Image (cartoon, coloured by chain):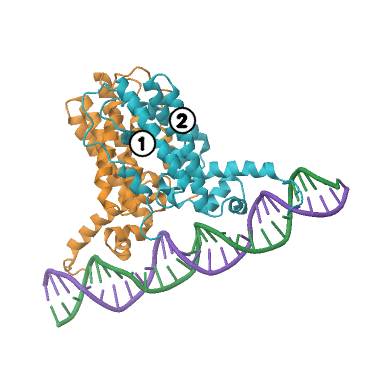
Chain colours: A orange, B cyan, C purple, D green
Amino acid sequence: MSQPRRRAPRQAEAERNDRALLRAAREVLAADGAHASVAAIATRAGVGIGSLYRRYRTKEELFQKLAELSLDIWNEAAERALAEEDPWEGLAGFIAACAESGHGSLAPVAGTIEITEEMRIKNERSDRLLAALVERAHRAGVLRPDVTPVDISLLIEQLGRSPVLDQLRARGREDLVEAATAARRRLIAIAVDGLRPCHARPLPGDPPSDRLFTERWRRPAGE
Amino acid sequence: MSQPRRRAPRQAEAERNDRALLRAAREVLAADGAHASVAAIATRAGVGIGSLYRRYRTKEELFQKLAELSLDIWNEAAERALAEEDPWEGLAGFIAACAESGHGSLAPVAGTIEITEEMRIKNERSDRLLAALVERAHRAGVLRPDVTPVDISLLIEQLGRSPVLDQLRARGREDLVEAATAARRRLIAIAVDGLRPCHARPLPGDPPSDRLFTERWRRPAGE
DNA sequence: CCTATAACGGAGCGATTCGCTCCGCAAGGA
DNA sequence: TCCTTGCGGAGCGAATCGCTCCGTTATAGG
């Protein structure tokens, strides 16, 4: 133990596998929802089940890591958006980036995994960044005035999951994945254009409460 | 056999149960996706498994019935939309009605059930009606010109599934279902406004191919 | 009232799938 | 060469699947 240890012989392969696992987990989660199985994830990554469990002690731990990575990606996108000079281009680009990132597929695990301290912190930061983006756009008058940050969050989640794309991938039709991605990009463009302040009628109903998010991620009673 | 038979003793209860089953099947399908189980459907309907299997010989038969009902609902909505005088109000109302109907949850069963003759016929009619709606709106100049009927179909499917709503229902938080429905209604309004012809940039990429639908509903090789 | 019967609920079948453990083997640095 | 590290996947008990089967219950007709 106190001796100078040897170097790891297959470290490069391990790192490659880790990346493949995280990517596969995201895809399988998108395709199979909450019922995604570890076997399916390992197979999709081209990796043995043993390798998965050497890195993540449980399925839950893998999903927690995945959630933290998603929050990182969203936060980086939000900061890039704030660095953009044009308030509208920043916000629109942020929405499109988040929706297309494929990291929106985490929704089905909401409430099934424990929220780690890291997730909590990154999520708070995410809330602050989005609020800043929306407020800046409002102040510049480039966003319809009755849209709230919660509306934007819900819109990103709604656009982030693509039933078509998920199912084509689940059935192995990789030949159509590109067409489906391009098609969704058009839908995102349509929805984002609907956020501009040039529309006759105000949005229906009251602004949505953020309890729609917080309550979903709470673990159910018992454990 | 040739005698005048007795009347059915519990026929009223049977009809109530049938409606409850179809409604429950839709909800469970929305919440659990392709892995929805017959036991979950029966439980949600407040009905025994035996009663389900008396009416539908297999799980597939239940889903086929559900698909036919959805197509009926969509077609009726499309005809009401064509009867509307204002081409824009007609199309916008049609999209909102389809998206909110809750019958969009059938996507996950695409490709897992045999397409009945009735489904095929009703689907053809559905295609014709939508094409007419879109063309009328285009001719009136109230719809952005680069939007195709396939775009509209994909948009309806995208808006029809609500990750938030599905999951809240799956976790039994009926108290938040109404808030989630109202929130989605705002998103639908946003997306529909994005279809108006007042936007600077054209939609990205080529118009989507309808193979994105047809290929998904084809059974995989074998069986 | 009673009787006949259609419709009921759900225990339980075999088959499948789940998350996860464990171990024999391969790869590469010293 | 040997030793360390990571590898793949067979297989465990438990859970869940679609579906069958049967004893029970509620109601129309006499």
The local secondary structure at tag 1 comes to: helix
Above or below residue B188? Residue D25 is: below
- Say few, some or many: other residues with alpha carbon within 10 Å of mark 1 (under 14 / 14 to 19 / 20 or more): some
Q: Quadrant of residue B17?
A: top right
Q: Residue at x 39, y 49 (%)?
A: A33
Identified at 40% across, 30% down, the residue is B95
Mark 1, residue position:
B153
Q: Is residue B30 left or right of residue A10?
A: right
Work out which quarter of the rendered image holds the N terminus of chain A and state it. bottom left
According to the image, label 2 marks what residue?
B77
The front one of B19 and A64 is B19
Q: Nearer the viewer, residue A220 or B88?
A: B88
Q: CA distance from mark 1 to mark 2?
A: 14 Å
Which amino acid is tagged 2?
Ala
Which amino acid, mark 1? Ser
Q: Position of residue A122 (x, y in %)?
A: 30, 40
Q: Marks 2 and 1: in contact by CB < 8 Å?
A: no
Residue occupying the point 69% across, 44% down? B11
Q: Chain of mark 1?
A: B
* Residue B120, position as x, y percentages in the image: 43, 44
Secondary structure category for the residue under label 2: helix
> Is A3 left or right of B35, judged from the image as shown?
left
Asked whether the viewer can see residue B161, the reply is no
In the image, A44: left or right of B58? Answer: left
